[in-house]
Image: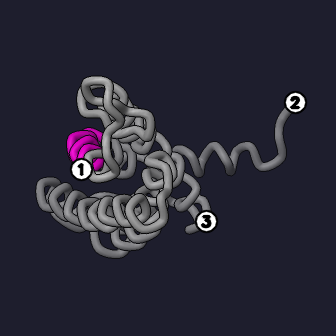
Amino acid sequence: MKIPHQDTLKRWLQTHDTPVFVQFVKYGLCGVASTIILLAITMTLSNTMIPAMDWSTIEGQPITDAQRQRNLIINNLIAFPFANQVSYLLNARLVFVPGRHSRPAEFSLFTSIAGFGFLIGLLGGPFLIRWFGLPSVLAQFVLIGTSALVNFLCRKFLVFVR
């Protein structure tokens, strides 16, 4: 049984020639993939080598909010390059049309924009932990939300052809 408009949906998944809404949905799916990488690395580090969770302890003592904030920043900084590489590769292949800049310039601009959005979110997380007492996981999702929209708009209009 054929789904109505199945050919159109298949074409949209395989080409860059899509309506903006479809492009944003594809962007979102690529973002989910890179976010999974970021979260997997950050949460693994936060639960093991560089404790940053609400329940984390060092030598049997609970860590302070200041330690949690610092460690969460460190863990995100370690995870960022891996998530950014996945994001670039998926976006260049599935969402946007490369070619406005040379590949090295394109990747540098892509990374700079991602870094700016990431920095805003990264600074927002400790602020929310300190001033509002949010759990680390919720602060992590603030990082994701604040950078997603900025990144899409900048990448669409500054990095890629369309």
Q: How many numbered discs sit on the rendered protein?
A: 3
Q: Which dot, 3 or 1, sits closer to the camera?
A: 1
Q: Which dot, 2 or 1, sits closer to the camera?
A: 1
- Residue at the location (32% across, 68% down)? 120
Residue type of the residue flagged with mark 2: Met
**Left or right: where 99 falls relative to 153:** left
User: Residue 19: image x %, image y %?
Assistant: 59, 66
Q: Quadrant of the N terminus?
A: top right
What secondary structure prevails in the magenta region? helix
Up the image or down, 46 lies above or below 89; here it is above
Magenta range: 70-84
Q: Residue furthest bottom?
A: 157
Up the image or down, 157 lies above or below 104; here it is below
Q: Which dot, 3 or 2, sits closer to the camera?
A: 3
Q: Earlier in the sequence, mark 3 or mark 1?
A: 3
User: Residue 37: image x %, image y %?
Assistant: 38, 36
Q: Quadrant of residue 63?
A: top left
- SS at mark 1? helix
- SS at mark 2? loop
**Left or right: where 155 falls relative to 100:** right
Residue type of the residue flagged with mark 1: Arg
**Residue that numbered label 3 is attached to:** 21
Q: Quadrant of the C terminus?
A: bottom left
**Residue that numbered label 2 is attached to:** 1
**Residue that numbered label 1 is attached to:** 70
- Residue at the location (49% across, 50% down)? 135
